[in-house]
Image (tube, rainbow, N blue to C red):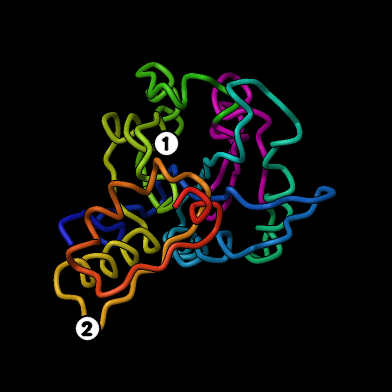
Amino acid sequence: MNKRSVRSIDCQGKKVLVRVDFNVPIQDGRVTDETRIIESLPTLRYLLDQKASVLLCAHLGRPKGTANLKYSLEPIAQCLQKHLNQTVFFAKDCVGAEAKEAAAKLQGSQVLLLENLRFHPEEEKNDSSFAQELASLAQIFVQDAFGAVHRGHASTVGVSKHIPSASGFLLEKEIQALSKILRQPETPFLTILGGAKVSDKIDVIQNLLPKSDHILIGGGMSYTF
């Protein structure tokens, strides 16, 4: 893997901004599937062991660039602190005065979750000023949101242009697994694809066709086929 790992960057006592994939289902103010939160824990625990101040940024749903409490990440902070067995502070914005103040107060081995990135239209536009403002909250950026890295957004592409960056353990694990099956797959090689958005998957299907013995398509995609 030719990506720099968080293991190879000095995070000791630093402020570290981590892009996580916390796009999880929430019902009645409670997270109903904690899988993605649990997957982020190895990276977060490693950084906390390094006495880093950990700032988390993520998106939830599609609020279309406006603040909508239906898509607030606050319930996720409550869920995460259960798994980390420590307080997870929450900032009601991901940029601006409140985010800066909360980041400045954060001590080593403490965690701060920033509000939904997509409350700002600049996130999905990969706006340079927005990315720079996000980056200004920390000294190091760690990308660990495997489910979002295919998006050219400020928190996936833009931030990495402003501060030293590395991949987290989840991203590292997924890249290694994908590299193995795409370069030297064991046969028979069966590909299972799901989801609703066929347009996002066409390139994937075309890439996997010559490598796969069989491709099974389920979910909303199957209706199109």
Q: Mark 2 packing: few (<14 Cα in 10 Å), some, or many (20+)?
A: few
* Closer mark to the observer between disc 2 and disc 1: 2
Task: Give the image location of residue 140, x and y in percent.
Answer: 35, 42
**Left or right: 98 as drawn, with respect to 206:** right
Q: Which mark is residue 138?
A: 1
Highlighted range, magenta: 88-117
Q: Position of residue 65 (x, y in %)?
A: 58, 21
Image disc number at residue 187: 2
Regarding mark 1 in the picture, which secondary structure is present there? loop
Residue 42 image point, x, y percent? 46, 67
Q: Position of residue 72 (x, y in %)?
A: 70, 37
Q: Kindly indicate the quadrant of the structure image that contains residue 141.
A: top left
User: Type of residue at label 2?
Assistant: Thr
Residue farthest to the right, as pictured: 28
For the residue labelled by badge 2, is the local secondary structure a helix, a strand or a loop? loop
Q: Is residue 108 magenta?
A: yes
Q: Amino acid at mark 1?
A: Ala
Q: Residue at x 52, y 19 (%)?
A: 121
Taking the image as shown, residue 15 lies to the left or right of residue 68, namely left
User: Is 149 part of what is drawn in magenta?
Assistant: no
Left or right of 89? Residue 159 is left
User: From what the image shows, is residue 19 above or below residue 191?
Assistant: above
